[in-house]
Amino acid sequence: MQITFLGTSSGVPTRSRNVSSVALRLPQRAELWLFDCGEGTQHQIMRSELKISQLSRIFITHMHGDHIFGLMGLLATCGLAGNVERIDIYGPPGLNDYIQSASRYSYTHFSYPIKVHAIRPGIIYEDDDFTVSCGNLHHRITAFGYRVAEKDRAGRFDVEKAKALQIPPGRVYGQLKRGETVTLADGRVIDGTQLCGPTEIGRKIAYCTDTIYCDGAVQLADDVDVLIHEATFAHQDAEMAFQRLHSTTTMAAQTALAAGAHRLIMSHFSPRYAPGNTLELKDLLKEARAIFPRTDMAYDFMIHEVPRRREVELTKVSV
């Protein structure tokens, strides 16, 4: 699982930051999932190492322009030059009407299937490898946060140990790899879990924007490996955050702390904290780290690899 930040500014783009979009790359299945699609997102994808042809799912948090104005342009490009097979789009009520109206008035016709899913809290997608769920956030309009959970899988199968036990290779190896209990032809009963390493815990990420601090975000971020959370304002501008129902750095950090997240990556920053101003983004990072030390600050084209917890633990041991 690889996260690429395509837009990290709130409201309007700046010279160094585009508006909201985050890509989740799943190399093992050659898929690309997108979270929000602000204006210019397709240009950001083209400037990155991501491939539009792999785009299969788009998740929209809410219907504000800085999160959806890039959607129609991206979808049109996918049809003209993207070579995509199908795109499923998930988002709040009204999203399908928006796409249909924009398509009608711009005379845009898609050469590939598009399915729009109007979502409500709960599981909105599931396959053999992943579960995606959403929950309500607290913003000025209906807004959802997302949680992507990779399913746990059996640990690595010890082939040498199986050979030492004189277990004949074949279909039985597959059963043992899945942790099943198998009765061999000679009557021996073999517990597959005894031949497999520790269970590989599935990776989990949460994406929460736009919102003020709320229980919904804490629930979505429960025990995640990475929480991507908006931090539009500095702590001293909390009154403005309450008025506009956006988060401060301290709210993002408190969400990560309450949820037991393993890492917080802040995004969606107000342009008011540009270099040279009284408060800069480096000051916002200090505020968050004072509450939740494992905090990073996203920037456009930043890439974050989400490690498996087994790999994380091995790293800790080696250190």
Image (cartoon, rainbow, N blue to C red):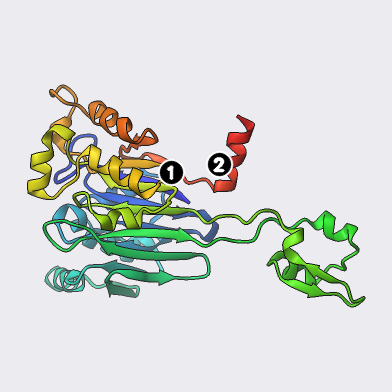
Where residue 58 sits, quadrant-wise, is bottom left
Query: Element type at marker 1?
Result: loop
Vertically, is 213 above or below 114?
above
What residue is rendered at 17% in x and 42% in y?
13
- Label 1: which residue? 262
71 sits to left or right of 195: left
Residue 171 seen in the figure? no
The numbered disc on residue 254 is: none
**Residue 166 drawn at (x, y percent):** 91, 63
Decide which of 251, 275 is in the foreground and name it: 251
The kind of residue on which mark 1 rests is His
| Mark 1 and mark 2 residues within 8 Å of each other at the beta carbon | yes
The kind of residue on which mark 2 rests is Val
Decide which of 95, 214 is in the foreground and name it: 214
- Label 2: which residue? 312
- View extreme (front): residue: 258
